[in-house]
Image: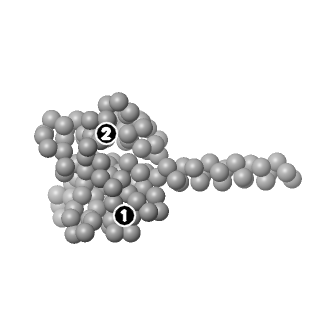
Amino acid sequence: MDTQLESLKEKFPFLTFGTYLEKEYLGIIQNSDNHLISLYAYNSIPNEKNRKQFLEYGEIWWWESNRQIPINLFMRKQFEIFRPFLKTFIRKDFNIMFGPTVSLQEIITKRIKRRTIQLVKKSD
C-alpha cells in the first residue's frame, strides 16, 4: 500500500478504502450486508469546505459513538447534506482494502443471539 494511503488510514481511522470495477473509493460505510455496501464517497464531494466538514463529522462519529450505529443515524440532521454522495455497490464486487464496516444486520443478529443465550441459561 502506498504511503499516502497509509497516512490516511492512520489519520482518519473511520475511512474505508476499496475498489469496485477498477475504480477506487474512499469514504464512510453507511451499511454493509450480505448483498450490498453503501458508502458515503469522500471523493465525490465537490468542494473543500464540505470535505472538511465530512471529515469532522467522521471524527465525531468515530470517537463519540459505539461505531456500530451508522453515521447517518448517529448524526441524523448534520449528515443529511452528504446524502447525494451515498453510493451503493454489489458486495461481492467491492474489494475493501482497509477500514471499518458497519452492519445493521450484525447488530440484529447479536441481539437475537444474546437473548437466546439468556433464555437457555434461565431454563436450567
Report the residue that reaches farthest toward the left. 47
Is residue 21 depicted above or below 98 in this figure?
A: below
Is residue 24 depicted above or below 10 in this figure?
A: below
**Nearer the camera: disc 2 or disc 1:** 1
Residue named by callout 2: 59
Residue in the picture at 19% in, 49% down: 44
Res 65 → quadrant: top left
Residue named by callout 1: 90
Amino acid type, residue under disc 1 in the picture: Ile
Q: In the visual, does 81 lie left or right of 122?
A: left
Residue in the picture at 57% in, 50% down: 108
Q: CA distance from mark 2 to mark 1?
A: 27 Å
Q: In the visual, does 64 lie left or right of 21?
A: right
Mark 1 lies on a secondary structure that is strand
User: Callout 1 environment at 10 Å: few (<14), some (14 to 19), or many (20+)?
Assistant: some
Residue 106 percent coordinates (x, y): 53, 54
Residue 111 visible (yes or no): yes
Residue 81 percent coordinates (x, y): 26, 35
Residue 97 percent coordinates (x, y): 30, 64
Mark 2 lies on a secondary structure that is helix
Residue in the picture at 38% in, 69% down: 92
Residue in the picture at 65% in, 51% down: 112
Q: In the visual, does 49 lie left or right of 118?
A: left
Is residue 76 depicted above or below 27 in this figure?
A: above
Mark positioned earlier in the residue sequence (2 or 1) = 2
